[in-house]
Image (cartoon, grey):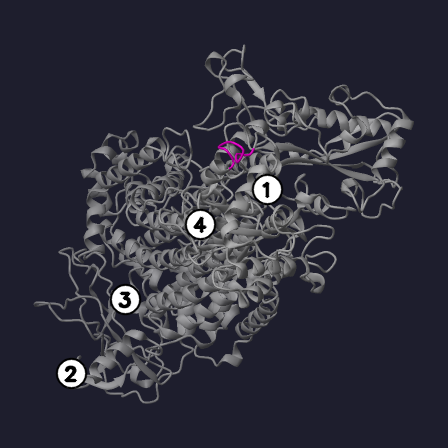
Amino acid sequence: VRMLGGDGAPSDSPLAANDVRSSIKIAGLEQSDDSGGSGGVSRGADVPASMYPDLAPPPRNKHAADAKEDGFVSSALVFEDKTSPTLSGTHVDATMEPMKDMVASEKQVVVEGLQDVSGEGGTGGTPPHKVHQGAGGKSGSVEQHEEAWDDVSSPIVGNWSRLIAKHYYYILLGLVATCIAMSVFVMYGPADQRCTPGATSGQMTVCDTTPYDWSLPYGNASLFKDAYLNAIESVEPAFKTLTGGDTGQVAERSASANDFAITWIFQHEDGSDSTIFTPKKVQAMCEAEAVVTQHPLWGYYCPLAADGSCAGQTLSAVHRFYATPQERKDCTLLSQGTVDARSAALMSNLLTSTNGYFANEGTVEGGYTNATRSMLQLGQPLKGFTGEEDDNDDQRLVYRMLAQGFKCGKDGKVPMHDSKFEGFDADSPCAGKSEGTEIVGVEQKIFDHFSMKGFPESGQFQGALRSAYFVKPKVELDGEGALRARFYAGMFQQLEFNRVVNGDLNFAILSVATVFYYIYFHTRSALIATASMFHIVISLPVGYFFYFNVFQYHYYSQMHILAIFLALGIGADSVFVYVDAWKESGKMHTIRTNAGRVHFALHRSAQSCFNTTFTTVMSFVATCLTPIMPIHAFAVYAAIVMSVNYLLVISYTPCIVMIYHIHMSDKGGCCCFCTGAGTWCKWQEHAEQDTVEARQRDKCYNCAWYSKGEANLPKPAAMHEESAIQRANSSQERETLETLLSRMGKVEHFMYERYSPLLMGRTPHAPFYKKPVACGVILFFLGYFAFMLSSAAQLTPPKTEELWFPDGHMHNADFFKRLADGWKGTADNQYIRAAITVGVDEMERPNYNWFFPGRERGAVTWDPLFDLTQPEQQLFFMSACDAVQGHACEGGGDSPCKGGRLVRSGQQVSCVVRDLLNRYKATTDATATTIPANAFFGVYKDYVNTAGEATQSQLKQVIGGNDAKVLWASITFMTSADAESLSNARGHHLKENLRELVDGLRGGAPGGMQSIFFTDLERPGGGFTWTEVEDALVQNLFTGFSICFPVVFVVLVFASGNLLLALYATVSIAMIVVGVLGAVQVYHGWDLGIAESISGVIVIGFSVDYTVHLGHMYKEAWDQPSREEKTRFALTHMGGTVVGGGLTTALSGGVLFLCTLLFFTKMGTLLVWTIFLSMFHALFFFMACCAVAGPTGNFGSVYYMFRVCRERMGFGKKE
């Protein structure tokens, strides 16, 4: 605003904000006079001061007192204006001092940027594009702010707004039809058999899990393990030929399937320190195991003896008391003497036999144990498979049938997936049974035996809301304390995992209902709430349509379910932004058309929601960089869903709001319209003229029953001069803004009347030390940030195996700890086995598909220099065996090795070359130190051919070749590390110990032995493979930080247009991330596991939302001359939206607390922490920074800097 001199030319002196004169002329306004004569004021008109003497404030200096009476007052003071309420109030603020350099002779004030296009009798033009203001002795230009919202000629937002305002029905129907069509295609379209074998339709189907899902396919641990396994598989045909065609194949169920064993822990219910082996308790143990061993399917899965019957179970405590199958079937009560004698035998030789497996750690030789373990092992390979690694995915599904059961098919057949299993072909368990007869699985049989019931108790959703594993199984015994039993099997845990996840999905319905009611409460419209929930929920299958069919991601897991909770929070927040902007547009006198209202609301929400959506999507993009496939796939899906949600917000939501406005905005829906008395859910009292005309054109509205009484409703009334003066007649800013706030909610009133004055005081342009509350808030948050930073720095990968179930669940942390620790001895199959292999050059994966990791895992290439016929290579191999046997493994608390040695005490490494040499020495030359080259292959063939079947199966694991030469060989051994207690730190210790050993061997290896490598022989996805996964989780966290924070800063710069605001916001987001990670360590005591690592990156995207909203509104307050007013403007206009969006996201995430799976409850906890910390940092820390040192004028403006740079470089024209 500049003043005109006496000659009409603009003066160089700016107008002080508090200099009010009776001669004020706003260029571009126009006065019109009705024929009625009283001089009605139209929008855009100048108002003669003589018409409204009450608008003139008391004179503040002699120049104002002497002013002429023929000036004009802007119609902005007459009409209710929400775009610049503070500016108009500032002009009448009597507390501000006038500028000392004011020129007394200046009589007029004009707003630059208005072009006089009037004809005779008035001025006209457009609203100001740029205002030069002076405040506190400082001046500067505020950048262009286009507010001609009724002008919808802009190519993108304007034209889209015009189309929505005119064709809202057609656009809505097109969007809904398209979304439903995509959803139907996803639900019933062709499925991918690689994901779910046997599925005929339905793309959105959870894929079968495999042990390889969480492995890193190109990590060393995975590559080395696959190389070893593929080396065995590659030479298997030649091995069969060498041994006569059949003996190389492992006999049916001749080995133990350790991964599918059923393990029991029996102990006293009261924890008493007495022997667990009493006649009644031993009988109860027998009856519990009999549920498994007497199951009709047990004969198809048990290990086989030489005669074809089920072999004895060497690790079953029951088998030590009941010697024969008939005794184990009858489970008769044994005499006390029999139990004592057999218990005494069991408690002897605890350290030199497997007896230590059954005894507590504190048990003394010949003493007693007050708890015991027992294991029922299954046999492998199953009939139709050649070995453990033969199509292990198929075998895994067949083992699961024992646990889960099935329903019989036609003709007494067992319905099977496409499987190699032949066990049910000749002797079907469904023989003689009608179709549909259920063979109840072992797991359910155990539930029934111990009366373990979940909720619901039966049916398709059995145990969905409460698992049966929350019931503690025990057996009440007459005359003595009860026996407590706990049991575990990998196949049971997988069934429970799937059951719990499907049950936790039910809470998504509760989350949807919770968010629905809050949207209804916030928008005061059930129609808007219902339509909003449709758009949020439909974004999931629509996003999956693009995920599956466009981007060709065919992997869907339980983790993808989290997208619904994320979409609910983001979607509701976006709806709030649009609806609040729409309501605000109804109070702006500069907007006179519905198209203009759509334009205003769409402009604000499109920009604000784009900023938040883009940063959230980028956080998922950063998460996509992880080498862990399930997390990568989830991040891609979530990013697509967030993008679809944004597109629907700027297309679907405006149509819904427009329809509601036409039909219900002044009626309020059923709750108000039917009663005729309610006003709470009305968006406005009466319809505007443009809305009335739109209703006349709307055939659907005219057909509605509630439009029939339209003639009796009040018509839109013209503004009377008296009511205009009454609303605007005030010399205080508060009264002007109270008029503005009259249609706002309680949150906005609180932000303006209570919180803003408390935060920044009431003195404009006050120095920071006069804002003690704001400074105190900043210092508090900085101190809390420092504390949380030190806590977050202490986070480490899990010290124990990642757990999935809570404390009340049977498979909790205490159970797994008890399963592995506190026993006198550990079964051989619970120690980690390892192999050191030579002869393999590399592992190639030419046809590998990341999303189906159990298929096409690749093949090895052989080392061309490897040749065991060479004496130096034989000597090196045998020296390597000696080095492994004597290698130390120490390191204090982080060492997993027992006894300080790598190889378990009492065990010998398998050294196949030495075995071959001993065979040669025994048959040919007793003094030989190596096998001659021309005799080596013959010795190898003879040794394999003459070995027993069990030895041949073992040889297959350590050496292999074709019909001409040996291609590879391996040193296998049992380490002294317990697999069940292998934490990340201990895994690293063991891995580094082996690396040190192998690197030392490689340093002295001859040619052909340089390709030596090591691997553990744990199940795929376990052992060192899982250690690599945990390392990748931590690395991905910091990689995400390095990507997200720069992206967030750039987005914030463009969103706010100011470097200082972007800096404040970025610091706030960093504090939020640190606060969440610190809370993980301080308040919950968690490690940096899967959920924590995923959330650490995602939290960046969610923490941006509320800071961006407030920063955007601070930028929009371009007409506010001080940082205090800008801060108050942002809080008043966006505070309610921030609170509403935060509460809905927190409520949707809080529902996850009800879930059973720890992963979901952790994600819910972290999500709620993120939301509340984001709200508090945005409303307190960020706003406090703005109140204390927020930018004003052009300070920090990137647009101003860019313009100045262009001008200085000669690309722009100086004004």
Residue 241 visible in the displayed image: yes
Residue at image position (84%, 33%) is 277
**Amino acid of disc 4:** Met
Left or right, 499 with respect to 648, comes to right
Tell me the residue that label 4 is attached to.
629
Disc 4 on helix, strand or loop?
helix
How many residues crowd mark 3 within 10 Å: few (<14), some (14–19), many (20+)? some
Left or right, 1004 with respect to 974, comes to left
**Amino acid of disc 1:** Gln
Is label 2 or label 4 in front?
A: 4
Is label 3 or label 1 in front?
A: 1
Marks 2 and 1, how far apart at CA: 105 Å
- Contact between labelled residues 3 and 2, with CB atoms less than 8 Å apart: no
Q: Main secondary structure of the magenta part?
A: loop
Please state which of residues 390 and 754 is positioned toward the viewer in this rendering.
390
Residue at image position (38%, 83%) is 136
Marks 2 and 3, how far apart at CA: 26 Å
| Residue 1211 coordinates in the image, percent (x, y) | 17, 80
Marks 4 and 1, how far apart at CA: 34 Å
Disc 3 on helix, strand or loop?
loop
Tell me the residue that label 3 is attached to.
52
Tell me the residue that label 2 is attached to.
8
Q: Which mark is residue 954?
A: 1
Marks 2 and 4, how far apart at CA: 72 Å
| Residue 60 coordinates in the image, percent (x, y) | 36, 81
Q: Earlier in the sequence, mark 3 or mark 1?
A: 3
How many residues crowd mark 2 within 10 Å: few (<14), some (14–19), many (20+)? few
